[in-house]
Amino acid sequence: MSKQIIVSNEGLNKLQSELEHLKTVKRKEVAQAIQKARSFGDLSENSEYDEAKNEQAEIEGKIAHLEETLKYAIVLDDKDLGTDKVSIGNKVTVHSIDNDEDTVFKIVSSTEADPMNFCISDESPLGKALVGQKIGDSINVETPSGITKYTIAAISK
């Protein structure tokens, strides 16, 4: 991963908190689970030991991924954010031509994406279609249910 990752201050804090939790809490929990499993004897047939070692590997993988992500993270400064065209950090009001409804999405990086709360990644099909567009532009987005047509109604910070 040598790609710059744009994150908000909130997103950066969340990533740092998750990394700290994994390093200080989860590592200790897994170490204790491994120690407990070792006390059960024969490691070759010890499923608790195998589970704990697998969890340890998973946690270490997450830690490495978060450290790599933070290494390339660039914090988005709201004062540098424009509203003339859609970019990461913007809130975009789109009007669905198909069902005549407006929806507000926030464009974020993939590390902060939360579609259930209308925070969509710039790498998602809708995010890709929106980035670089201006108010009044129309886009077509391929969705599982077919092509959906939107018009960009507003762009804000």
Image: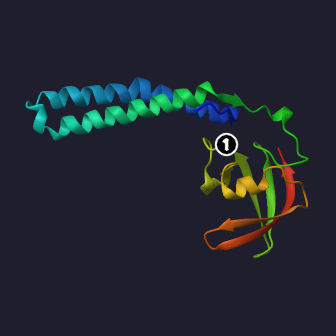
The correct choice, above or below, for 58 with respect to 122 in the image is above
Q: Where residue 91 appears, x then y in whole percent?
A: 78, 50
Going by the image, does 4 lie left or right of 155? left
Viewer-side residue, 98 vs 142: 142
User: The disc labelled 1 sits on which kind of residue?
Assistant: Ser
Going by the image, does 150 lie left or right of 112? right
What element does badge 1 sit on? loop
Q: Where residue 132 appears, x then y in whole percent?
A: 83, 49
Colour scheme of the picture: rainbow
Q: Where residue 90 appears, x then y in whole percent?
A: 79, 46
The correct choice, above or below, for 96 with respect to 15 in the image is below
Name the quadrant of the N terminus: top right
For this orientation, the residue located farthest to the left is: 42
Return the residue at label 1.
Answer: 109
- Disc 1: CA contacts within 10 A as few (<14), some (14-19) or many (>=20): many
Q: In which image quadrant can residue 144 be found? A: bottom right
For this orientation, the residue located farthest to the bottom is: 99
Going by the image, does 124 lie left or right of 101? left
